[in-house]
RNA sequence: GUGAUUGUAGCUCAGUCGGUUAGAGCGCCAGAUUGUGGCUCUGGAGGUCGCCGGUUCGAAUCCGGUCUUUCACCCCA
């Protein structure tokens, strides 16, 4: 065999069986989004590089896939930079487009660009692939689908509540048990202020994010390595040790952060959201988690993360409030909040737990065996009639051996086979075989529909 | 980007100390069964041992590089 063709690292092909399963996920998610009044949009796979650069931090810029300019792009690059091998500087000269890294930034661009046409508060959903030049790992791909819901142009915390409801509804429909983790950037800012390191918010959050993974001791070591004073770390300890119910945590925090204006604001926000959630009697557990600090630097209020309870795969949904995302593109004062469902991880979870409903797998219900030109012509007409009644059926395209056609039906999981050969045609009947029981009987064409729908 | 790890038939994997013709199971094709799938039996096809280079009389096996897989870190859905 010649060298096998292949696809780039971290990308995947999806077989028909996989696509049926994936579509079930997308359809479920879409259905819930629409139930809450969100409408679909799409944006191009590629964006201008200056739309993307600088939005995801230094790390994010490295993970952007860049697209080479068309034509003789090298001739336009400065020779000294080429010779110097300075990739970073050269990139700007030979590439001006990149593949989208997420759906939020393109959405912000979309909102700014189409602001005059939009009806605010603008609620949209968007289900499209995104690309990251990351190293693939379990549950991490270089091409993967995000399902984003966002609302922009509204400060109301009811939006946060609504998003949590959507999460709850989606996972209830998919039968995945999850915990919704909630935090608030303002509380984190309050904590940083409280320990006297208000300017070190990022260092602090990156470190405490690892708390349940590496433990308090190592978090403290990392904080110290990141240059935090011993006094500040000491003051942080009660926060790290915070335990108990949401109410108990909030109670303790109110005491600690009483002096911090942002801190109090954050606590108030979380309280409001949690109170509403309680009234709504959600099925999923909603938990205030102060170690939830990840997320892009543009989050300013609520931060969400959803984890599957029965599979260790990292977060399957995440999001938050960003007060000024559109500001980068020149539209100030528009606040947004949104979440993103990681379709590929949900796919992995569903596969591992085998949680697909039976209907997802079904192909045709009936196969017509092809005995030759004459017989096929009759089958064609009957098939058309059955399809009109909603029966999924197909006619085998070639006049192959019956064994081959039966094997085809068997493998495709088609329950019934219609045999209409010379003798059946003479009688104006057909032989209907049930592939599950192996039984077959002679029936009139008009009876087929009734027999299949039993 | 850093450090490990994997690669042999379509798939899952054996392959001894470097030795002559690289195997199994499943799948595929054909027949047993000319109008009947699954089960059984018989036969068959299918390999640049990821790729490139090196060591050696001789390499699937040892060495280097590269690509790929998986994992940890970084970061993240």
Image (spheres, coloured by chain):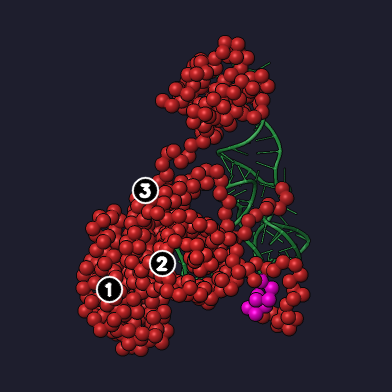
The residue under label 1 is: A267
The chain identifier of the residue carrying mark 3 reads A
Q: Secondary structure at mark 1?
A: helix
Query: Could you tell which of marks 2 and 3 lies nearer the N-terminus?
Result: 2
> Which hue is chain B drawn in?
green
Q: Which mark is residue A153?
A: 2
| Chain identifier matching the red colour in the rendered picture | A
Q: Identify the magenta region.
A: A87-95
Q: Is residue A84 above or below residue A276?
A: below
**Of A335 and A403, which appears nearest the observer?**
A335
Circles 2 and 1 on the same subunit: yes
**Of A42 and A295, which appears nearest the observer?**
A42
Residue A290 visible in the picture: yes
- Residue at 68% over, 22% down: A373
Using the numbered discs, state the Cα–Cα distance from disc 2 to disc 3 in whole angstroms: 29 Å
Residue A10 visible in the picture: no
């Amino acid at each position: 065999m010649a060298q096998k063709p292949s696809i780039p690292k971290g990308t995947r092909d999806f077989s028909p069986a996989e696509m049926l399963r994936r579509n079930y996920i997308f359809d479920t998610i879409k259905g819930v989004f629409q139930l809450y009044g969100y409408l679909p949009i799409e944006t191009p796979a590629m964006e201008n590089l200056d739309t993307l650069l600088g939005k995801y931090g230094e790390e994010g810029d490295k993970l952007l896939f860049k697209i080479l300019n068309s034509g003789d792009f090298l001739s336009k690059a400065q020779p000294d930079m080429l010779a110097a091998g300075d990739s970073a500087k050269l990139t700007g000269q030979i590439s001006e487009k990149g593949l989208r890294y997420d759906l939020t930034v393109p959405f912000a661009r979309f909102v700014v660009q189409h602001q005059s046409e939009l009806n605010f508060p603008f609620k949209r959903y968007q289900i499209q692939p995104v690309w990251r030049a990351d190293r693939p790992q379990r549950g991490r791909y270089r091409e993967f689908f995000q399902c984003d819901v966002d609302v922009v142009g509204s400060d109301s915390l009811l939006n946060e509540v609504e998003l949590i409801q959507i999460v709850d509804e989606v996972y209830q429909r998919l039968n995945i048990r999850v915990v919704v983790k909630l935090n608030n950037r303002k509380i984190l800012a309050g904590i940083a202020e409280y320990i006297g390191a208000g300017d070190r918010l990022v260092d602090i959050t990156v470190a405490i994010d690892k708390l349940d993974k590496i433990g308090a001791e190592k978090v403290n070591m990392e904080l110290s390595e990141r240059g935090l004073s011993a006094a500040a770390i000491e003051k942080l300890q009660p926060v790290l040790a915070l335990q108990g119910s949401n109410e108990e945590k909030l109670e303790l925090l109110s005491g600690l952060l009483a002096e911090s204006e942002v801190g109090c604001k954050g606590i108030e926000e979380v309280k409001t959201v949690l109170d509403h959630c309680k009234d709504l009697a959600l099925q999923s557990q909603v938990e205030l988690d102060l170690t939830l600090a990840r997320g892009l630097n543009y989050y300013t209020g609520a931060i969400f993360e959803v984890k599957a309870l029965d599979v260790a795969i990292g977060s399957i949904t995440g999001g938050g409030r960003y007060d000024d995302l559109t500001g980068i593109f020149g539209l100030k004062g528009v606040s947004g909040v949104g979440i993103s469902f990681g379709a590929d991880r949900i796919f992995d979870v569903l596969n591992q737990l085998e949680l697909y409903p039976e209907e997802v797998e079904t192909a045709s219900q009936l196969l017509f065996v092809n005995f030759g030109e004459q017989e096929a012509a009759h089958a064609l007409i009957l098939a058309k009639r059955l399809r009109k009644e909603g029966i999924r059926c197909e006619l085998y395209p070639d006049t192959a051996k019956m064994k081959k056609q039966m094997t085809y039906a068997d493998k495709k999981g088609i329950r019934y086979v219609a045999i209409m050969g010379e003798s059946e045609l003479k009688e104006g009947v057909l032989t209907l075989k049930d592939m599950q029981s192996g039984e077959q009987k002679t029936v009139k064409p008009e009876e087929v529909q009734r027999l299949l729908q039993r």
